[in-house]
């Protein structure tokens, strides 16, 4: 059995990326459907520790309201659940556009001309 060049193998990263970007491979969409639209945006504990004082400062400086650390965490949690998905989804759309553009460039970048043996032999 002859092996295809790497850019033609069905298991190659380029092949899979090309099919995904062209909508031929439904795995990423199926994965999102399996999650039933639930893609929680989670922060690490160190990130939360950095963000909470900023939330408190915002309330203090902009709204002239002092809030506790616990309330700042509640506000952060609310924004992560209610508003962050809009930014997340826009990021996914931006990434998709970027990768589609890169996939469209693949034939020009990853093209290898065939039947060159005899031309090379003449030189």
Image: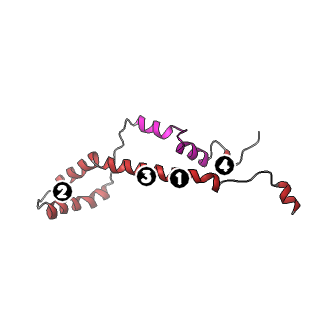
Residue 11 among those drawn in magenta: no
Residue holding disc 1:
101
- Residue 3 pos. (x, y %): 73, 44
Residue at x 34%, y 44% (from the top left corner):
40
Task: Choose the circle earlier in sequence order: 3 or 1.
Answer: 3
Left or right of 21? Residue 54 is left
When asked about the image quadrant of residue 120, the answer is bottom right
Left or right of 8? Residue 51 is left
Foreground pick, 38 / 7:
7
Task: Choose the circle earlier in sequence order: 4 or 1.
Answer: 4
Task: Choose the circle earlier in sequence order: 2 or 4.
Answer: 4
| Distance (Cα) linking label 2 and label 1 | 44 Å
Residue at x 61%, y 45% (from the top left corner):
15
| Distance (Cα) linking label 2 and label 4 | 53 Å
Q: Which mark is residue 94?
A: 3
Residue 15 among those drawn in magenta: yes
Foreground pick, 17 / 56:
17
Q: Which mark is residue 69?
A: 2
Foreground pick, 109 / 9:
109
- Residue 117 pos. (x, y %): 83, 54
Task: Choose the circle earlier in sequence order: 3 or 4.
Answer: 4
């Amino acid at each position: 059995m002859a092996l295809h060049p790497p850019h033609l193998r069905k298991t190659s990263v380029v092949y899979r990326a090309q099919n995904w970007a062209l909508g031929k491979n439904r795995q990423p969409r199926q994965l999102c459907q399996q999650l039933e639209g639930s893609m929680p945006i989670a922060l690490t504990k160190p990130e939360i520790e950095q963000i909470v004082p900023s939330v408190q400062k915002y309330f203090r400086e902009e709204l002239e309201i002092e809030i506790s650390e616990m309330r700042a965490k509640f506000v952060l949690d609310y924004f992560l659940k209610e508003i962050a998905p809009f930014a997340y989804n826009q990021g996914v759309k931006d990434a998709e556009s970027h990768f589609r553009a890169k996939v469209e460039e693949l034939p020009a970048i990853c093209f290898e001309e065939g039947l060159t043996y005899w031309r090379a032999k003449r030189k």
